[in-house]
Amino acid sequence: MLFLTLIVVYVQILFEDENIIELGVLSTAKLTAHLEILLVKPMENMKHSNLIATALWAFFGVMSFTVEAASVPCSKGDLAGSWLAVVNTTGSNSIQKCTIAFNTIGKITSGSCLDMQSKYTFLVSGSSSINSQCGVSLNLSLKNLVVITANGAMSRGKDDIISTFTNTLGKFGSISAVKY
């Protein structure tokens, strides 16, 4: 859903002797603002050049809103499915390769991680949440001993997550995940 709060379209004739028209559109969405400016020098023999230039600019403005509207907000359902994650931590001097599946309400339905150094595999449980701006929060329990609290973001394609985390041992690291 596009949260459009303000649209201002203006036409200003600059340098009357050169007949240059400045067209502008200012739009603000929930967290972003866009200012588009176009300078047009209509042909001298073109009747109604101001009207035509305004119509062209309105077309460009509508097209920019269409692109903005195509960026659909995220929802819990976007996390549902199977993910392959790489966990880097300062605590183990190792990397863990994890496979985790989330249901449509953000709960982990299955999960395990392989420590690449020790070759030990351990179970993962926990939950996740996502906001409409695609901010992701994870609460993962590893080996039922260590809890990871991660905050990051999901890509526009909704198939990648990148985040940083802290754990109950006071260590920190990063998580990169791809949906498969």
Image (cartoon, grey):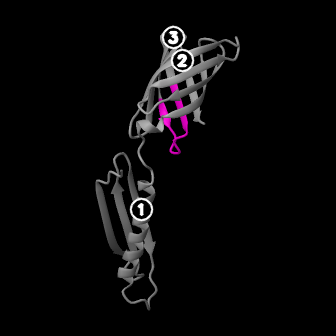
Task: Check disc 2 and report its element: helix, strand or loop.
Answer: strand
Q: Earlier in the sequence, mark 3 or mark 2?
A: 2
Res 76 → quadrant: top left
Where is residue 15 shown, x and y percent of the image? 38, 77
Q: Earlier in the sequence, mark 3 or mark 1?
A: 1
Point 61% across, 19% down: residue = 113
Residue type highlighted by circle 2: Val
Q: Which residues are magenta?
A: 152-164
Q: Within 10 angstroms of label 2, few (less than 14), some, or many (20 or more) residues?
A: many
Res 93 → quadrant: top right
Where is residue 161 shown, x and y percent of the image? 53, 34
Q: CA distance from mark 3 to mark 2?
A: 10 Å
Q: Observer-nearest residue: 26 or 174?
A: 174
Where is residue 153 shown, x and y percent of the image? 48, 35
Residue type highlighted by circle 3: Val
Residue hosting label 2:
124
Q: Within 10 angstroms of label 3, few (less than 14), some, or many (20 or more) residues?
A: few
Residue hosting label 1:
36
Task: Check disc 3 and report its element: helix, strand or loop.
Answer: strand
Mark 3 or mark 1, whichever is nearer to me: 3
Q: Observer-nearest residue: 103 or 3?
A: 103
Res 51 → quadrant: bottom left
Residue type highlighted by circle 1: Glu
Residue hosting label 3:
146
- Relative placement, left or right, of 158 versus 98 is left
Task: Check disc 1 and report its element: helix, strand or loop.
Answer: strand
The answer to the question of whether label 2 and label 1 lie on touching residues, with beta carbons closer than 8 A, is: no
Q: Is residue 161 in the magenta section? A: yes
Point 59% across, 35% down: residue = 178
The answer to the question of whether label 3 and label 1 lie on touching residues, with beta carbons closer than 8 A, is: no
Q: Earlier in the sequence, mark 2 or mark 1?
A: 1
Up/down of 13 relative to 80, above or below = below
